[in-house]
Image (cartoon, grey):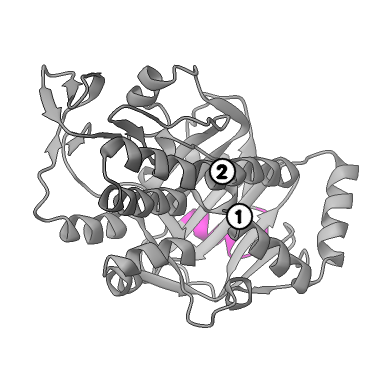
Amino acid sequence: MLERATAIHPAGAGLALQPNAMAVLDALGLDDAVSAAGAALSRAVLLDPSGRQLGPETRLERVFENTAARVVALHRARLHDVLLAAAANTIVRTGVRVTGYEQSTNRVTVIGDDGTRLETDLLVGADGLHSTVRAQLVDDGPPRYAGYTSWRGVTPAGTVPPPDRVTETWGRGERFGIVDIGFGEIYWFAVADAAPGGTDGDVRAELRARFGHWHPPVPAVLDATPADRILRTDIFDREPIPLWHDGRVVLLGDAAHPMTPNLGQGAAQAIEDAGVLAESLTAAATVEDALRAYEAARVGRTSAFVRASRRFGEVAQWRHPLAVFARDLMMRLTPESALVAQARRMLAVR
């Protein structure tokens, strides 16, 4: 495995793994380890900036029709630790950025920026939003900016009492989410309409100006998070593509289907990719047959999530007062049963 980072070290903020991702991890024998590395989530609700509910609280076990189904939120670094421990016998070469590949009928040569030329039977391009492998395979240009940026952080353990439910608060062109990730820590994210490429002089002052007057515990969460633990990331996605492979080269995760984070399915879909790819390689007679089967199983499902996540984000980011009023009224009038049915339909897309 080639990794562009110079070392494997704790990075990122938090994420929530829904049961579709947990099912893959369970098949690998990692369900318990991942669950122990985070916190199980059971309830979620939308709020407005004053703290009023925008519609009913959702019980997550109803969405997944299985009281044993788990939604686990955890720090990305703890998930990385679990996965690295499980792959202890895998060689990871750090500090190598893949710049391209060459392939023949039976082999692929991976080319690194340090002069590396590694011959292999299969190249899996899991190199993210700005994938070099994708650029060579489909050459579809730069990703699409969604129109908003995000900030993510994790409060130090014990500084703010963990919430008893997941909350996402919708304002006008702004959002704020709060999630318990275990170990006394809270993962939070903020979203705001902005031009791409923006920077913050004093990031906490910027966030306080935007969100400091919102309902508790939003101000306390911001105050508790050190500035050097706040990450700013512009939000991008790409138009879905029907072709993920060529010969013995194939895409996975954000390299194949980068999506906005609005449905919390980015990591889950990458984990699903990995599970299906492994099964296809085991079952098929040839690598080419395996990659065709993988592509056929995954393109439609992930494309649906890309589009649904984009639509959800567009509505959540509405800022015109009349549009926001109509959106919030619609959410307040929507019963939990309708929200549950909608979520089930989305997760059942194949």
- Labelled disc at residue 58: none
Q: Are marks 2 and 1 in contact (CB under 8 Å)?
A: yes
Give the structural element (helix, strand or loop) at label 1.
Answer: loop
Where does residue 305 sit, x and y in percent of width and height? 59, 46
- Labelled disc at residue 349: 1
Q: Does 116 sit above or below residue 92?
A: above
In front of the other: 193 or 56: 56
In front of the other: 321 or 225: 321
Name the quadrant containing residue 235: top right
Which residue reaches farthest bottom?
67
Question: What residue is at 49 percent from the left and 18 percent from the top?
Answer: 140
Where does residue 261 sit, x and y in percent of width and height? 54, 46
Can residue 18 be seen here? The reply is no
Residue position marked by numbered label 2 in the rendering: 300
Residue range highlighted in magenta: 213-223
Question: What residue is at 37 percent from the left and 62 percent from the top?
Answer: 24
What is the three-letter code of the residue carrying label 1? Answer: Val
Question: What residue is at 31 percent from the left and 27 percent from the top?
Answer: 247
